Image (cartoon, grey):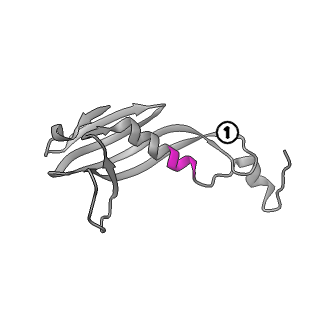
Amino acid sequence: MKIEFRKVPQTPKELEVEYNSVKIEGTFCKISQSLVKVDAVLLGNTDIDCCRCGIAEVIEVDEELHLLLSDGVYNKDESEYLVIEVENNLIDFDEIIESELNSIKSDYHICKDCLQLGDNFEKEF
C-alpha cells in the first residue's frame, strides 16, 4: 500500500497491510508537517536461514514497530522511534515491511537441529 505524505491525516488512522504472508497492523498519523508516526505490530511467518547449516526454517514474526516517517532528511538526533526517511513524498508500507523482514533475516539465527548439537559444531559443505 502506498500513500502520499500530504494525504496522511492528523488523527490516527487504522493500518492493515499484508505483504508476503506478513502483515502490519496498527495506526499512523501525521504529527508535524514533515513527520508521520506509526505504532504497529508486524505479524506473520517468514523463512529464515540457519547461520550454521544454511537450512531454511519458518519462524513466527511478532514484532512491535514504533516508527517515524520523515518527508526528506531528518535532522534531529534524539528519538525513541526508528526514523525512516521517505523519498518522493510517497510512503510505501510494502517496502517498510520488506525492510523490517530483511532486518530480522540478517540477525543471527540457529535452527533447532544445530542448537541440539551444542557449541562444538563444524560442518563442511
Residue that label 1 marks:
56
Quarter of the figure with the C terminus: top right
Q: Is residue 47 left or right of residue 122?
A: left
Q: Is residue 118 left or right of residue 109?
A: right
The residue type indicated by label 1 comes to Ala
Residue depicted at 64% across the width and 52% down the height: 109
Closer-to-camera residue (79/25): 79
Residue 54: which quarter of the image? top right
Quarter of the figure with the N terminus: top left
Total count of labels: 1
Residue 42 picture location, percent across and down: 42, 43
10 Å crowding of disc 1: few (<14), some (14-19), many (20+): few
Q: In this view, does 65 lie to the left or right of 113?
A: left
Outermost residue toward the bottom in this view: 78
Residue 103 is inside the magenta segment: yes
Residue range of the region highlighted in magenta in the rendering: 102-106
Residue depicted at 72% across the width and 41% down the height: 55
Residue 26 is inside the magenta segment: no
Q: Give the secondary structure at mark 1.
A: strand
Is the residue 16 above or below the residue 67 in the image? above
Is the residue 122 above or below the residue 47 in the image? below
Q: In this view, does 59 lie to the left or right of 38?
A: right
Closer-to-camera residue (88/111): 88
Residue 4 picture location, percent across and down: 22, 36
Residue 27 picture location, percent across and down: 26, 44
Magenta-colored segment: predominant secondary structure:
helix
Closer-to-camera residue (31/23): 31
Residue depicted at 32% across the width and 64% down the height: 80
Residue depicted at 53% across the width and 49% down the height: 104
Residue 74 picture location, percent across and down: 28, 58
